[in-house]
Amino acid sequence: MTQIPDVTLNDGRTIPQFGLGVFLMEPGETERIVSEALELGYRHIDTAAIYKNEAEVGAAIAKSGIPRDELYITTKLWNSRQTDAHTAMRESLDKLQLDRVDLYLIHWPTPEKDTYVGAWLDLEEIQAQGLATSIGVSNFMPEHLDKLVAQSSVVPAINQIEIHPTLQQRDAVAANEKFGIVTESWSPLGRGKADDLTSPVVTEIAAAVGKTPAQVVLRWHVQKGYVVFPKSSRRERLEENMRIFDFSLADDQMAAIDGLEAGTRVGPDPRTFN
């Protein structure tokens, strides 16, 4: 079984650096895919209330027989529930068939609503109650983090943001580092909407190291220190994605991928999405 390294968070806890994301995974397929991933050795699953598949993730966990302390489960608070976080958390736990999650995130800052600081204070209470081991945010830009940290007592452990070679969000990563926040990459392969996997830079590196373009890009994330959780519905791709810990990219290869920055978003802009 592949040994997946852990990353230490600013609250002293750890998170597996690699996992499975279930965004846009059909509820009818989610249980099967998560079950297959767990069979293959995945132990980190990232879901969210808005994905509408928490119940299927929970069913797969329950059927797996894997001890709870060997799993790392993340879910997220949706935008319309920022003033109702306690109830939303209980609903997620019921669907997941769990008494706690390992990580609970505010999904988006939704700056026009200006409710994310109040939601964060609720997450602090949720953590104190033992319902979430660690708490964090998703899609928070530097100004959102500055406001949050200034008005609360707990610094987020994680900020999950869109990152792939053609959108590296270096200002957001630098803000995370300033506060000791670990960066998680969503859409780490560009979701097929960007040139991340077809770039000659990536394909030439893949040929040189004997790996697929996807494995090269995922390895780039890992060597950056990011936590990464690609989505796949195919067992062979689940296996392929995991095989990124038996090789390394050289400094010049990392620099070449760094040079692909193009500002290409495949998801919404957190500064305007509400």
Image (cartoon, helix red, strand yellow):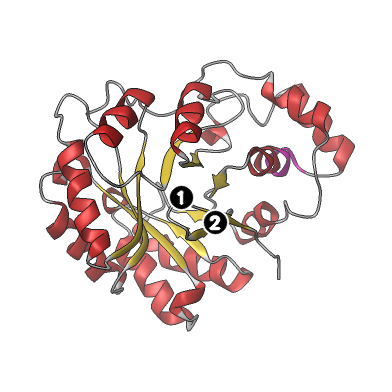
The secondary structure that dominates the magenta segment is helix
Labels 1 and 2 touching (C-beta < 8 A): no
| Residue kind at label 1, given as amino acid type | Asn
In-front residue for pair 257/233: 257
**Please, which residue is most extreme toward the right here?**
208
Relative to 84, residue 142 above or below: above
**Separation (CA) of disc 1 from disc 2:** 20 Å
| Residue sitting at x 41%, y 40% | 159
**Please, which residue is most extreme toward the bottom here?**
65
Q: Could you say whether the residue bearing mark 1 is in a helix, strand or loop?
A: loop
Relative to 176, residue 135 above or below: below
Q: Which residue is mark 2?
A: 19
| Residue sitting at x 16%, y 52% | 85
Q: Residue 21 appears at what percent x and percent y?
A: 47, 52
Residue 83 shows up from this direction: yes
| Residue kind at label 2, given as amino acid type | Gly
Look at discs 1 and 2 and give the one toward the viewer: 1
**In which quarter of the view is residue 82 placed?**
top left
Residue 269 shows up from this direction: no
Q: Residues within 10 Å of mark 2 (few under 14, many from 20)?
A: many
Taking the magenta stretch, the answer to whether it contains residue 178 is no
Tell me which segment is drawn in magenta: 212-216
Q: Could you say whether the residue bearing mark 2 is in a helix, strand or loop?
A: loop
**In which quarter of the view is residue 30 placed?**
bottom left
Q: Which residue is mark 1?
A: 10
First-in-chain label (1 vs 2): 1
| Residue sitting at x 73%, y 37% | 213
In-front residue for pair 180/240: 180
